[in-house]
Image (cartoon, helix red, strand yellow):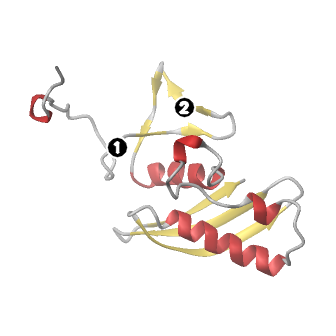
């Protein structure tokens, strides 16, 4: 009734090094980027940047789809309604973000954190060092 895996053939469409396709996402509008009626694929550092922003914007444990996974970050408890010192908050934010990002096998380290807080959000700027020795700076506002 179901095909054997040897009966299934894959086409030669481009895939990221993780084996899955990634698509550009506009976090400002909350929707995928579409051009000529088609989603825009991305790979390499662009795919990693989309993944980073998504994981930082996903509160760990909030969504059922991520139950029993380590996907996301615990950021809200550190930012909202607490009396922790600024130094403690920044240290914990760095630790939480680095732990979340290092789940990606393409990211070998995270360095040069800069955290800016305002009344409604935090902006995190960091540098990711990739396993292929590439590196790039990523800025995310959460």
Q: Residue at horizontal 62%, vertical 69%?
A: 96
Q: Crowdedness of circle 1 by 10 Å Cα count: few (<14), some, many (20+)?
A: few
For label 2, the residue is: 33
Q: Is mark 1 on a helix, strand or loop?
A: loop
Residue 54 point in image, percent of width and height: 58, 49
State the mark number for residue 1.
Answer: none
Where residue 37 appears, as percent x and y from the top left, is 48, 18
Q: Residue at horizontal 69%, vertical 39%?
A: 28
Q: Is residue 89 above or below residue 75?
A: below
Question: Looking at the image, which is closer to me, 46 or 109?
Answer: 109
Q: Which residue is denoted by mark 1 in the rendering?
A: 20
Q: Residue at x 16, y 19 (%)?
A: 1
Residue 13 in the image: x percent, y percent? 26, 34
Determine whether, in the image, residue 87 is placed left or right of residue 57: right
Crowding near the residue tagged with mark 2, few <14, some 14–19, many ≥20 C-alpha atoms within 10 Å: some
Give the residue drawn at x 12%, y 31%: 4
Q: In the rendered structure, which disc, 1 or 2, sits on the residue that comes first in sequence?
A: 1
Q: Quick one: SS at disc 2?
A: loop
């Amino acid at each position: 009734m179901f095909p054997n895996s040897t009966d299934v053939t894959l086409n030669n469409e481009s895939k990221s090094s993780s084996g899955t396709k990634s698509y550009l996402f506009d976090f400002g509008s909350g929707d995928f980027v579409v051009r000529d009626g088609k989603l825009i694929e991305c790979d390499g550092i662009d795919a990693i940047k989309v993944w980073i922003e998504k994981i930082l914007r996903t509160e760990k444990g909030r969504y059922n789809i991520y139950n029993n996974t380590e996907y996301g970050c615990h950021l809200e408890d550190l930012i909202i309604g607490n009396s922790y010192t600024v130094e403690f908050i920044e240290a914990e934010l760095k630790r939480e973000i680095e732990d979340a990002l290092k789940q990606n096998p393409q990211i070998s380290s995270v360095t040069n954190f800069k955290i800016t807080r305002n009344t409604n959000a935090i902006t995190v700027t960091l540098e990711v060092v990739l396993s292929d020795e590439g590196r790039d700076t990523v800025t995310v506002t959460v």
